[in-house]
């Protein structure tokens, strides 16, 4: 399989065509960005770690029957995925208060929510990805009510898969962000990535952050957190992706 023409470049990944129209080449970059790209830094090794970690989580989701775009990991920083039309929404699941919900609602970081909740953010750089209601989403024609219902159900189901799995590895799943897209068959499936860039992972024992908050908050040791997550994932039989670094 060969990497073809560059189709799209985002902040964390590049998407290329391949010789097969049903497969795209997704390359994870060695760069960290935060706050809509205001903070940006080269981070050698991050691409391979996120590629390995995300591949592992997608394989776990496959084992649980969740439909997604991931096909297989092809090299250190790249994986093959199915083409989808991404909906302009970020679907965030929160189980523990952290990040923007603390600022918005005055919650204490670390407070365990009575049950996991789903939030919607409208993907629009100029608007800085605002939090939106289901009625806003209808107004913006970003998704249909049935699609919202499906994404909410899938997002909570993914929490129910990831939370106990990570718990066994001594990792608290605080929150995570998903993106969904429509594939060639018209199905709404999970796309993008599941990695320390898009999830908050805290060590159960020490409460240490092992995700992109280390970079966002300038705590240092960003990649140490990612490495620790990858190390713990490798202890599990589920998944099965490899990391060359
Ligand atoms: P937040 O607390 O900043 O709203 O983030 C919630 C979750 O979503 C957290 O796990 C990080 C993730 N996230 C992204 O993946 N991309 C983004 O652009 C933002 C703002 C958050
Ligand atoms: N990934 C986003 C950016 O690069 C924001 C974030 O995750 O904090 O701006």
Image: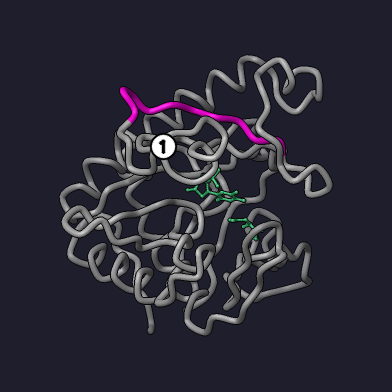
The percent coordinates of residue 216 (x first, y second) are 54, 63
> Does residue 75 appear in the picture of this structure?
no
Residue ID at (45%, 58%): 195
User: In the figure, is residue 53 to the left or right of 166?
Assistant: right
Stretch in magenta? 113-122
> Does residue 178 appear in the picture of this structure?
yes
Residue ID at (74%, 65%): 9
Q: Which residue is mark 1?
A: 66
Residue ID at (23%, 65%): 232
Q: Which quadrant would residue 242 be assigned to in this image?
A: bottom left
Query: Residue 230 colored magenta?
Result: no
Quarter of the figure with the C terminus? bottom left
Q: Which quadrant would residue 214 be assigned to in this image?
A: bottom left
Residue ID at (54%, 40%): 103
Image quadrant of ligand 2? bottom right
User: In the figure, is residue 107 to the left or right of 79?
Assistant: left
Magenta part, dominant SS: strand
Quarter of the figure with the N terminus? bottom right
The percent coordinates of residue 84 (x first, y second) are 67, 45
- According to the image, what is the colour scheme of the structure? one colour
The percent coordinates of residue 154 (x first, y second) are 45, 29
* Disc 1 crowd, CA 10 A, few/some/many (<14, 14-19, 20+): some
At numbered mark 1, what does the secondary structure look like: helix, strand or loop? loop
Label 1 beta carbon within 8 A of ligand 1: no
């Amino acid at each position: 399989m060969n990497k073809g023409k560059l189709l799209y470049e985002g902040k964390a990944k590049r998407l290329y065509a391949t010789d097969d129209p049903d497969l795209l080449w997704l390359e994870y970059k060695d760069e960290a960005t935060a706050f809509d790209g205001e903070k940006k830094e080269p981070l050698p090794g991050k691409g391979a770690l996120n590629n390995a970690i995300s591949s592992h989580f997608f394989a776990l989701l496959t084992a649980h029957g969740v439909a997604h775009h991931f096909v297989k990991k092809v090299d250190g920083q790249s994986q093959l995925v199915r083409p989808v039309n991404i909906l302009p929404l970020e679907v965030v699941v929160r189980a523990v208060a952290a990040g923007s919900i603390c600022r918005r609602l005055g919650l204490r970081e670390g407070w365990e929510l009575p049950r996991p909740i789903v939030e919607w953010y409208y993907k629009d750089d100029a608007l800085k990805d605002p939090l939106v209601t289901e009625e806003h989403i209808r107004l913006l024609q970003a998704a249909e009510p049935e699609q919202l219902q499906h994404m909410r159900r899938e997002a909570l189901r993914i929490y129910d898969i990831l939370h106990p799995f990570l718990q066994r590895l001594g990792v608290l799943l605080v929150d995570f962000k998903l993106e969904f897209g429509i594939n060639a068959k018209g199905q709404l499936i999970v796309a993008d990535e599941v990695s320390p860039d898009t999830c908050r992972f805290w060590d159960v024992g020490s409460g240490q952050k092992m995700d992109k908050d280390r970079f966002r908050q300038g705590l240092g040791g960003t990649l140490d957190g990612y490495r620790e997550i990858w190390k713990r994932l490798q202890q599990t039989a589920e998944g099965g992706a490899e990391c060359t670094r």
